Image (cartoon, rainbow, N blue to C red):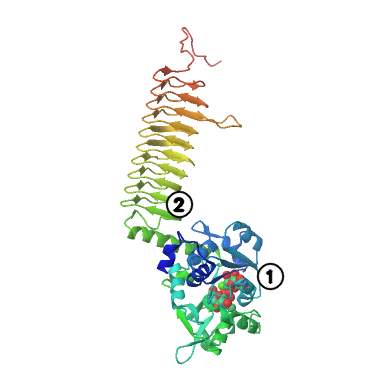
Amino acid sequence: TTLLFKSQGCVPRTSEMNHFLRYCTSMNIVILAAGMGKRMHSRLPKVLQPLAGRPMLDHVLSAVDALATEKVVVVGHCAQEVKDHYEGQSGLRFVLQMPQLGTGHALMQAWPALDKAQSHTLVCLGDVPLLSSATVEKMKAQAKGDDLVLLTVNLDQPKGYGRIVRNAQGQVTSIVEEKDATDEQRAIREVNTGIMLLPTARLDGWLKRLSNDNAQQEYYLTDLIGFAAQDGVAISTVQPDHVYEVEGVNSKVQLVTLERVWQRAQAQRLLEAGVTLIDPDRIDIRGELVCGRDVEIDVGCIFEGHVELADGVRVGAYSVIRNAKIEEEVEILPFCHFDGATVGKASRVGPYSRLRPGAELKGNNHIGNFVEVKKSVVGLDSKVNHLTYIGDADIGQRVNVGAGTITCNYDGVNKFRTVIGDDAFIGSDTQLVAPVVVGAGATIGAGTTLTRNAPEGKLTLSRARQMTIEGWTRPTKK
Ligand code: UD1
Ligand code: CA
């Protein structure tokens, strides 16, 4: 395979090679997601309910992503909404299960969509979001020939789950659902997680044998395990590293419980990588946070989308940072809000600064309290320290923007740019009515409404002349 992969770049792949590659690396994946989720009490379909900012189904798709290029998702309740959500995303195939007659019935609906050449078919559940890719890899590694691999866990409180029934030799012989179980079977603590790797070639025959002659009058996927044992198919089991990986979500209570588990696991990962978290229970990562060395994050921060914090970055308390790149040694003071921004080396931003999409600070900048920057470049060593709006602007190096400065970038219909040259000084309370250019080294007097370009190196100001009225007295109460 090494040779094969090496040659991919220069030699066009033949269809046989493609087939071989797929055979080596792939399997069928079926995700059951047709159930209702009544206990969520929400209009949003259950599998779209967010965990760490992403739908639960996204987490399942990520866990199995490396195993197959195409995933089959069985949808039923709110099927259209789920399909619409993934509109345009490649590698997903939706199969409708209507009505929902059980997990076995769900797999029956998926069967026509499966690649019969794949030796195994992995079944996952759309409402079991924290399944790890390590666990599915472990299942895959254990699969051989046409055997069957079950993911099971031992629970002190197995109530509600299907129980794993083993014979005297310890071999799995069946799974019995709680509602169909004898008292003796209910005492079994090893339970079915619902996640299993099935031999594809056997599926058609087994699915045809399913009946709904049971306590719930459903077609049980779990009955396939009994068929496998009867047919002499080897059944082995794998345990996940953490029980939370196989916990299902039926209510907001369970969802938030797993959210905390996930957040704690992310915090743990950061701490182990050397990041200083003032309190690992008070950080939320809804996406991907990449940190360099000696990064320090104070309490209450939320990271969304893809965020990079380079070496030595310090993030003050209660900041919300989304899709941002923060370069070395930047200090973010508390209560900042960034979205789609880049902050250059050694800058100091905040407290209470807002950087909106397209804000690009080149480095060593000071952005202070109640300053908003949008779609603007702020050059090296420039400072915008207080109460200012910078929108659609190009600011050069070593510029000082005084308090209360506003770029008037919008005429109600169109947006215009403001350009400020290197070493310019913008006096406080200035309105820059765009399009307008402030030349390099120009000084703008405080309180100016700049409607025409200000020349380089000179003082420009627009200001009513100050006067004092002699002999004026304050009115008195009549
Ligand atoms: C199922 C298992 C049980 C296991 C438990 C783990 C069966 C018969 N039982 O029980 O052994 O311990 O999961 O959580 O398989 N779904 C469909 N279509 C259907 C029914 C369900 O797509 O017709 C989907 C649901 O959306 C859900 C999953 O399958 O994601 C499991 O369904 P659920 O009703 O929760 O199964 P359980 O009865 O809890
Ligand atoms: Ca369930």
For marks 2 and 1, the one nearer the N-term is 1
Query: Which residue corresponds to mark 1?
Result: 98
Instruction: Point out which mark residue 306 bears.
Output: 2
User: What x and y, as percent, mark residue 249?
Assistant: 54, 67
As drawn, the residue found furthest toward the top would be 471
User: What x and y, as percent, mark residue 31?
Assistant: 56, 69
As drawn, the residue found furthest toward the right would be 99
User: What x and y, as percent, mark residue 147?
Assistant: 50, 82
Task: Tell me which corner region of the image, top left, top right, bottom left or bottom right, holds residue 457.
Answer: top left
What is the number of callouts on the image?
A: 2
Looking at the rendering, the quadrant in which ligand 2 lies is bottom right
Asked if residue 469 shows in the view, the reply is yes
Q: Amino acid at mark 1?
A: Met
Task: Tell me which corner region of the image, top left, top right, bottom left or bottom right, holds residue 289.
Answer: bottom left
Secondary structure under tag 2 reads strand
Is 399 above or below relative to 122?
A: above
Q: Residues within 10 Å of mark 2 (few under 14, many from 20)?
A: some
Secondary structure under tag 1 reads loop
